[in-house]
C-alpha cells in the first residue's frame, strides 16, 4: 500500500479507534484465559453489563451530576476570579510586586492537601469540594491570563489609543481579546484540575458524588461496578475536554494557529 | 500673520533610563510642518527617528513640546492617525471590523459608518475580503487595511513608521504608489519615517536627515518633483537621481560619523 | 549595582514582606479569637507542634515515605515516558498504536484509578508508586513526543549528510536537541508526583504525609494539620527551586528563547 494511502487509513475515524479495540480484545483474551483472578479483572462483558446497568439506573447519574456540579461551580468561580487577578497582575506593577510571591507559592502546594483543612472548617460535603476546586483552578487562570495580557504588543495598544479608545475601554477592547488564546489554554488545564480535585475530595471524605461511589463499590467488593464507574468518569472527562476544545476552536477562528481556509 | 504650522516640534528631547546608564535618544529636535506637506525623516539606524514619531503620536513623554494647530498635544488622539511597520491590526476582528473600529468611537450613525467602511475597502482594493481575518492576509494586504483603518477616522495628520519596511520589494513599490495616490487626493499632512532614501525622495516634498543617536535634525532637503508622470519615468529621471544622491550622501555621512564615534568611545 | 540585581533584591524583599504580613495577620487573628482555636490555631502553636513532630521523628518518617514513593513513581514514569515518547515520534506505527489511548486517558483524573491500583497492589507503597507513575507518564510522554517531533529537520539533515547512523542520530542529535523540552515536561511532572502521592495517601492511608494528615484531621488536631500542610508547601517550593537550579547549571537544558 502506498505511504499516503496508509497514512490516511490510519488517521481515519476507524483507524483511530482500532488500537482501543485491540486493547479490548487483549483484555477479553486475558480474562477468558483465566490467567487472572476474575475478581481482580472482571471481563469486558461483565463490566459492559455493569455500565449498562448503572446508566439505566439512577445511581450513577445522580452522583455524576453532583460531581459535575461541584467541579463546574468551582471551575466557574476559580476562572472568573483567576482572570480578574491575572488582569490585575499584568496591569498593576504594585499589585504584581506583592501578589506574585503568594501566587508563586501556591503553585508548590498540592491543593488536595488543603482538603483536610476544609473538612475541619466546613465539614464534609459540597463546600469543601467547591473550595478545593476553586483554589486549584485559580492558579492556571491567573498565570495564563497575566501572560496573555502582558504579552500584548505595544503597537496594538498604541494603535487602539490613536483610534480613540478610552483608557477604561482598553481592557475589553484590546487586552482581554488578545489574552483569549492564553485564557482558553489555561481553562483547559483548569478543567482537568477541577475533575481531579472534585473526585479526590469526594474520595477523601464525602457522602455522595462519583468519587465516593467508586470507593464504595470497591469497599463492597462490587469490582465490575467499580470498573464501570471509573470508565464513566474517563469518558465524561474526555468528552468535557473535547467540548472545551471545540469551543476554543470556534472562538479562536481568528488566531494564527487556527486551521482551515 | 504667519500661518500656524500644522505640526510644530519644539526642542523635543527624550532620554531613556538604561540598564547600566541613561540613553539619550533625541537631542532638542525642532521641526515645523505645514498643512498638506509630506515630510520624511531619514537617518542611520538607531538614530531615534521612530522615537520622534512616537513622541509626536503622543505615546511617549518627552521634554520640549509638540504643538498641533498651535495647541500642545495631550497623549494620542484621532487627529493624528498612525500606521506602524508591524500593521498593529486587531487579529480578532475581520477586515471590515478593523476599519470600523475607529469609526465606532465617533458620533456618526451606523449606516454612515458602514458606508465609509465599504468605500475605504474599495479604495484599498480589498472588496471580497471584508470578512477575512488578518491572519489570512498577506503583508501588503494587512498594511492596506491598516492604512484604511487610520483613514476611516479622517485624521488631518498621518504618522507613518516605516510602513513598508516589512514588505518585499515589489509590494513595497505598489504600496508606495497607493500612498502617493491617497496623499495627492486627500492632501493630508504626512510625517513618515523611513530608512529607504529612494522611497523618501519618491513620496515626500521635504526630507529631514537625522544625525546618529542622540538624534537631531542636521539637514533638510526640499524635493520638487513632478509626480504626475509615470513611475518608470520619474525614477529614472535626472532630477530624481540628483535628489536621491544628495540625500543618500548626507545620510551616509551621518552613519559614518556614528561609526567613528562608536569606535572612539569603545 | 545593575538594575537587574536591584530588582532581584527587591523581589526577595517584597516576598518577605508578603509572607511576614500573612504570618502576622494569622497570629494576630488567632490570638484575638477571631476564629475558634480549632479552625485557626496561632502560628506559634503550629510552629511548636511542627517542631515536636520533627523531634519525635514522625514527620521525617512520613516525609521520607512520601518522597520516596513520589520519586520512584516519577523515575518509573520517566524511564517509560521518555523512550516511548521519542519512539512514538520516530515510528508512525507506534504513534498510531498509542495515541488514542493517550488522548483518552490524558484528560481523565488519574486519582479515579486509585481503587483499581489498591485492588491489585494493596494499600501500601506499591499501589501508590504505580499510581504516581501512571499519573506522571502522560505529561512526560506527551512532552517527549512533542520535543522529539519538533527537532529541527535541518539539524537532522545536516547530520545525515555527514554520514550519521540512525543510532548515533538518536543519541547525538535528537536527544540533545529535544532535551530542554523533555526537561520542561519533567518539571511539570514533579508537582504531579507529589500531589498524586499525597492524595492517594489521604484517600487510602498506608503511611506517609497524606495518611497522617487525614488522621490528624479526624482527631481534630489542627496544629498538626497546619504543620503538615506547611511542610508540604515548603517541600514543593524547595523541589521546584532545585529543578530551577539544575536547569540554570546546564544552560543547554533550558529552552532557547
Image: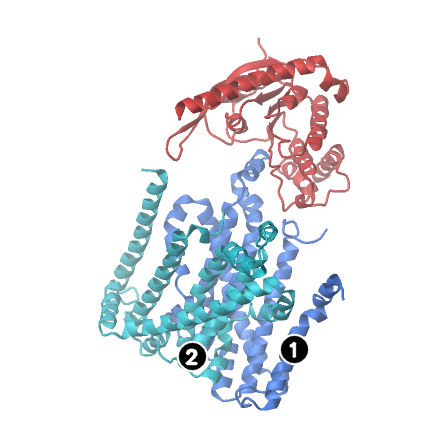
Identify whether A228 is placed above or below A2: below
Q: How many marks?
A: 2
Horizontal and vertical percent position of residue C88: 59, 65
> Could you tell me which chain the residue with mark 2 belongs to?
C
Tags 1 and 2 touching, CB below 8 Å: no
Residue count near mark 1 (Cα–Cα under 10 Å), binned few <14, some 14–19, many ≥20 = few
The foreground one among B148 and C113 is: C113
Whole-percent x and y of residue C85?
A: 55, 64
Alpha carbon separation for disc pair 1 and 2 = 28 Å
Residue A125 can be seen, yes or no: no
Q: Colour of chain A?
A: blue
x, y (%) of residue B157?
61, 25
In the rendered image, which residue does mark 1 sit on?
Answer: A22
Label 2 residue SS? helix
Q: Which residue does the numbered mark 2 point to in the structure image?
A: C126
Q: Residue at x 66, y 33 (%)?
A: B147
- Quadrant, the N terminus of chain C: top left
**Badge 1 element:** helix
Chain drawn in red = B
Q: Which chain is cyan?
A: C
Amino acid at each position: 500500500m502506498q505511504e499516503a494511502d496508509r497514512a490516511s487509513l490510519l488517521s481515519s475515524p476507524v483507524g483511530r479507534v482500532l488500537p482501543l479495540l485491540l486493547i479490548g480484545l487483549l483484555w477479553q483474551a486475558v480474562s477468558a484465559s483465566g490467567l487472572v483472578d476474575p475478581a481482580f479483572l472482571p471481563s469486558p462483558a461483565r463490566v459492559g453489563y455493569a455500565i449498562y446497568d448503572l446508566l439505566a439506573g439512577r445511581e450513577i447519574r445522580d452522583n455524576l451530576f453532583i460531581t459535575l456540579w461541584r467541579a463546574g461551580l468551582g471551575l466557574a468561580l476559580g476562572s472568573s476570579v483567576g482572570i480578574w487577578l491575572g488582569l490585575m497582575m499584568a496591569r498593576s506593577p504594585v499589585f504584581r510586586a506583592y501578589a506574585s510571591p503568594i501566587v508563586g507559592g501556591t503553585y508548590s502546594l498540592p491543593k488536595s492537601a488543603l482538603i483536610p483543612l476544609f473538612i475541619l472548617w466546613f465539614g464534609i460535603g459540597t463546600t469543601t469540594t467547591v473550595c478545593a476546586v476553586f483554589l486549584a483552578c485559580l492558579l492556571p487562570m491567573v498565570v495564563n491570563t497575566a501572560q496573555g495580557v502582558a504579552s500584548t504588543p505595544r503597537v496594538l495598544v498604541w494603535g487602539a489609543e490613536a483610534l480613540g479608545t478610552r483608557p477604561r475601554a482598553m481592557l475589553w477592547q484590546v487586552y482581554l481579546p488578545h489574552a483569549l488564546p492564553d485564557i482558553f489554554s489555561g481553562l483547559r488545564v483548569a478543567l482537568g484540575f477541577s475533575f481531579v480535585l472534585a473526585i479526590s475530595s469526594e474520595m477523601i471524605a464525602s457522602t455522595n458524588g462519583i468519587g465516593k461511589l467508586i470507593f464504595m463499590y470497591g469497599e463492597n467488593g462490587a469490582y465490575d461496578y467499580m470498573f464501570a464507574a471509573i470508565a464513566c468518569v474517563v469518558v465524561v472527562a474526555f468528552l468535557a475536554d473535547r467540548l472545551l476544545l471545540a469551543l476554543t476552536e470556534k472562538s479562536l477562528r481568528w488566531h494564527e494557529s487556527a486551521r482551515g481556509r | 500673520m504667519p500661518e500656524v504650522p500644522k505640526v510644530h516640534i519644539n526642542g523635543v528631547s527624550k532620554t531613556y533610563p538604561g540598564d547600566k546608564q541613561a540613553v539619550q535618544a533625541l537631542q532638542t529636535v525642532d521641526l515645523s510642518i505645514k498643512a498638506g506637506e509630506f515630510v520624511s525623516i531619514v537617518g542611520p539606524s538607531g538614530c531615534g527617528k521612530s522615537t520622534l514619531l512616537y513622541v509626536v503620536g503622543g505615546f511617549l513623554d518627552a521634554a520640549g513640546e509638540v504643538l498641533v494647530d498651535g495647541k500642545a498635544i495631550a497623549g494620542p488622539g484621532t487627529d493624528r492617525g498612525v500606521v506602524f511597520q508591524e500593521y498593529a491590526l486587531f487579529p480578532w476582528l475581520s477586515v471590515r471590523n478593523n476599519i470600523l473600529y475607529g469609526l465606532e468611537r465617533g458620533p456618526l450613525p451606523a449606516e454612515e459608518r458602514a458606508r465609509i467602511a465599504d468605500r475605504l475597502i474599495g479604495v484599498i482594493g480589498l472588496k471580497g475580503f471584508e470578512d477575512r481575518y488578518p491572519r489570512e492576509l498577506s503583508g501588503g494586504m494587512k498594511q492596506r487595511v491598516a492604512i484604511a483603518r487610520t483613514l476611516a477616522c479622517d485624521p488631518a495628520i498621518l504618522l507613518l513608521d516605516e510602513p513598508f519596511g516589512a514588505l518585499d520589494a515589489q509590494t513595497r513599490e505598489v504600496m508606495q504608489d497607493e500612498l502617493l495616490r491617497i496623499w495627492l487626493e486627500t492632501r493630508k499632512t504626512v510625517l513618515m519615517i523611513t530608512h529607504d532614501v529612494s522611497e523618501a525622495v519618491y513620496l515626500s516634498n521635504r526630507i529631514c536627515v537625522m544625525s546618529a543617536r542622540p538624534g537631531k535634525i542636521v539637514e533638510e532637503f526640499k524635493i520638487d518633483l513632478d509626480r504626475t508622470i509615470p513611475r518608470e519615468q520619474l525614477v529614472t529621471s535626472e532630477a530624481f537621481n540628483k535628489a536621491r544622491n544628495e540625500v543618500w550622501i548626507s545620510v551616509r555621512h551621518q552613519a559614518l560619523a556614528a561609526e567613528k564615534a562608536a569606535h572612539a568611545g569603545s | 549595582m545593575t538594575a537587574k540585581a536591584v530588582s532581584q533584591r527587591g523581589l526577595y524583599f517584597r516576598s518577605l514582606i508578603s509572607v511576614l504580613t500573612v504570618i502576622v495577620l494569622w497570629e494576630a487573628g488567632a490570638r484575638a479569637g477571631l476564629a475558634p482555636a480549632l479552625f485557626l490555631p496561632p502560628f506559634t502553636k503550629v510552629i511548636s507542634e511542627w517542631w515536636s513532630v520533627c523531634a519525635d521523628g514522625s514527620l521525617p518518617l512520613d516525609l521520607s515515605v512520601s518522597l520516596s514513593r513520589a520519586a520512584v513513581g516519577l523515575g518509573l514514569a520517566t524511564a517509560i515516558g521518555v523512550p516511548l515518547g521519542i519512539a512514538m515520534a520516530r515510528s508512525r506505527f507506534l504513534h498510531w498504536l498509542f495515541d488514542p489511548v493517550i488522548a483518552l486517558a490524558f484528560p481523565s483524573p488519574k486519582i479515579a484509578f486509585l481503587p483499581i491500583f489498591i485492588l491489585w497492589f494493596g494499600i501500601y507503597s506499591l499501589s501508590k508508586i504505580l499510581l504516581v507513575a501512571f499519573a506522571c507518564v502522560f505529561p512526560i510522554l506527551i512532552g517527549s513526543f512533542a520535543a522529539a517531533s519538533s527537532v529541527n529537520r535541518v539539524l537532522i539533515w545536516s547530520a545525515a549528510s555527514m554520514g550519521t547512523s540512525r543510532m548515533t542520530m538518536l543519541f547525538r542529535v535528537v536527544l540533545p536537541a529535544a532535551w530542554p523540552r523533555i526537561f520542561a515536561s519533567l518539571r511539570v511532572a514533579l508537582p504531579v508526583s507529589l500531589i498524586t502521592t499525597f492524595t492517594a495517601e489521604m484517600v487510602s492511608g498506608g503511611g506517609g504525609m497524606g495518611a497522617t494528615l487525614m488522621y490528624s484531621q479526624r482527631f481534630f488536631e489542627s496544629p498538626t494539620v497546619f504543620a503538615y500542610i506547611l511542610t508540604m508547601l515548603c517541600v514543593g517550593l524547595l523541589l521546584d527551586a532545585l529543578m530551577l537550579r539544575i536547569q540554570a547549571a546546564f544552560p543547554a537544558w533550558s529552552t532557547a528563547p
